[in-house]
């Protein structure tokens, strides 16, 4: 079973960013008792940062090629969502240019 969420971009300076982007998460990643899925905050932070830095939603989808952000760019042990977002977006730009 797949679930989905919508990320609303809060990017005032990037008018080209979409108003919302739909991404899927496996129901197996959901934490019990209504907690956020594992690394959910990391994936949301990376996606928001990618849009803030100028990547378009279709470019992010092309880079991810059907994968979740945290699968394409794994979270390092102890990495905060902010640190992960900065590193993952840098790696996305490298992947995009290749």
Image (cartoon, grey):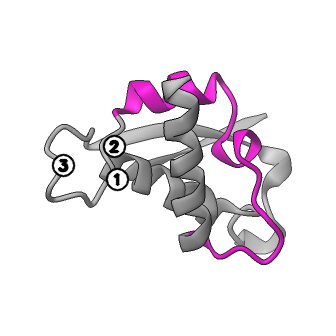
Horizontally, residue 34 falls left or right of residue 60, namely right
Q: Disc 2 to disc 3, how far (Cα)?
A: 13 Å
Q: Residue at x 35, y 46 (%)?
A: 51
Q: Secondary structure at mark 3?
A: loop
The quarter of the picture where the C terminus appears is top right
N-term mark: 1 or 3: 1
Q: Position of residue 96 (x, y in %)?
A: 51, 28
Q: Position of residue 30 (x, y in %)?
A: 78, 57
N-term mark: 1 or 2: 1
Q: Residue at x 65, y 76 (%)?
A: 80
68 inside magenta stretch: yes
Instruction: Tell me the magenta residue range.
Output: 56-81
Circles 1 and 2 in contact, beta carbons < 8 Å = yes
Q: Quadrant of residue 2?
A: top right
Dot in front, 2 or 3: 3
The residue beneath circle 2 is 20
50 inside magenta stretch: no
Q: Secondary structure at mark 1?
A: strand
The residue beneath circle 1 is 8
The residue beneath circle 3 is 14
N-term mark: 2 or 3: 3
How many residues crowd mark 3 within 10 Å: few (<14), some (14–19), many (20+)?
some
Q: Secondary structure at mark 2?
A: strand
Horizontally, residue 18 falls left or right of residue 73, namely left
């Amino acid at each position: 079973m797949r679930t989905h969420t919508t990320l609303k971009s809060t990017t005032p300076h990037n008018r080209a960013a979409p108003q919302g982007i739909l991404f899927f998460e496996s129901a197996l990643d959901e934490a019990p008792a209504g907690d956020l899925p594992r690394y959910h905050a990391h994936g949301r932070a990376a996606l928001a940062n990618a849009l803030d830095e100028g990547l378009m939603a279709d470019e992010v989808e092309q880079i991810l090629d059907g994968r979740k952000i945290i699968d394409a760019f794994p979270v390092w042990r102890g990495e905060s969502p902010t640190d992960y977002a900065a590193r993952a977006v840098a790696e996305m730009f490298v992947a995009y240019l290749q």
